[in-house]
Image (tube, helix red, strand yellow):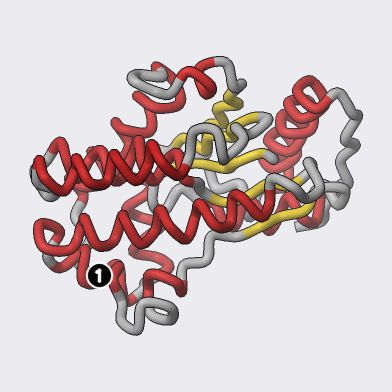
């Protein structure tokens, strides 16, 4: 299993769509946004979180953790050449941790969340073979969010994107405070500030890096298929 991580608006879904086309040997699993946007929770926890983070961060992140643990346990027994969008790890080290650091999650709530995380993940969820980090400047992320115009994201603030960008760098590049079994998991960092969706040459560069990364870490050659975008 490989995991694509990145800020809100980094282009993860677009990236995975192109992976499906240019690396057909790889299975792709998209983030099930409807779980916390509307469907499973019966209401849009995501929209409520953006409207009032101090009230809804704990509810949002706890619900997301449960959903992601369930998916992780299922997928870790499937085909290893699977790339999934976001994970239990960024949920913890980026979003929940950020909520705690900025006092959207209280000390008591963080203690409960940490107890659940330590109960559900270590010893049960196998670490991925690698992380693929789509790194974008917060300004680029904000522009892409405005362009896709999701109703649940209308209250999302630029300061929040800067915070989440910092948490991703701490988690994936600096590996500050990460669990021991994640320290040696390789990370491929891709500069995704440029529009790779409509630029065939840029996408070819990115897909080649992904192919080489998986070839090194999975030790199986993964040829790419040229796309006409």
> Residue at horizontal 51%, vertical 52%?
69
- Residue at image mark 1: 154
In the rendered image, the quadrant that contains the N terminus is top right
Front-lying residue, 56 or 194: 56
Q: How many neighbours does mark 1 have within 10 angstroms: few (below 14), some (14-19), or many (20 or more)? A: few
Horizontal side, residue 16 vs residue 226: left or right: left
Residue 169 at x, y percent in the picture: 37, 27
> Residue at horizontal 45%, vertical 44%?
120
Front-lying residue, 12 or 147: 12
Front-lying residue, 161 or 106: 106
> Residue at horizontal 46%, vertical 67%?
33
Residue 205 at x, y percent in the picture: 71, 33
Horizontal side, residue 13 vs residue 7: left or right: right
Front-lying residue, 38 or 22: 38
Horizontal side, residue 109 vs residue 35: left or right: left
Residue 71 at x, y percent in the picture: 58, 57
SS category of the residue bearing label 1: loop
Residue 16 at x, y percent in the picture: 65, 53
């Amino acid at each position: 299993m490989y995991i694509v991580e990145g800020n809100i608006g980094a282009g993860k879904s677009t990236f995975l769509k192109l992976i499906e086309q240019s690396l057909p040997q790889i299975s792709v699993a998209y983030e099930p946004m409807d779980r916390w946007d509307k469907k499973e929770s019966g209401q849009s926890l995501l929209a409520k979180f953006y409207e009032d983070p101090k009230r809804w961060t704990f509810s949002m992140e706890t619900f997301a953790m449960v959903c992601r643990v369930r998916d992780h346990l299922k997928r870790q027994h499937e085909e290893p050449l699977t790339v999934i969008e976001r994970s239990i790890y960024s949920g913890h080290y980026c979003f929940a941790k950020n909520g705690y650091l900025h006092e959207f999650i209280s000390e008591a709530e963080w203690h409960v969340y940490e107890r659940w995380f330590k109960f559900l993940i270590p010893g049960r969820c196998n670490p991925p073979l690698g992380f693929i980090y789509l790194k974008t400047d917060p300004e680029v992320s904000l522009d892409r969010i405005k362009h896709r115009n999701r109703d649940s994201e209308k209250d999302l603030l630029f300061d929040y994107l800067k915070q989440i960008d910092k948490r991703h760098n701490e988690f994936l590049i600096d590996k500050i405070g990460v669990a021991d079994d994640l320290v040696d998991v390789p990370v491929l960092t891709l500069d995704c500030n440029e529009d790779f969706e409509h630029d065939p040459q840029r996408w070819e560069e990115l897909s080649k890096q992904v192919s080489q990364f998986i070839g090194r870490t999975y030790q199986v050659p993964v040829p790419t298929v040229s796309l006409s975008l």
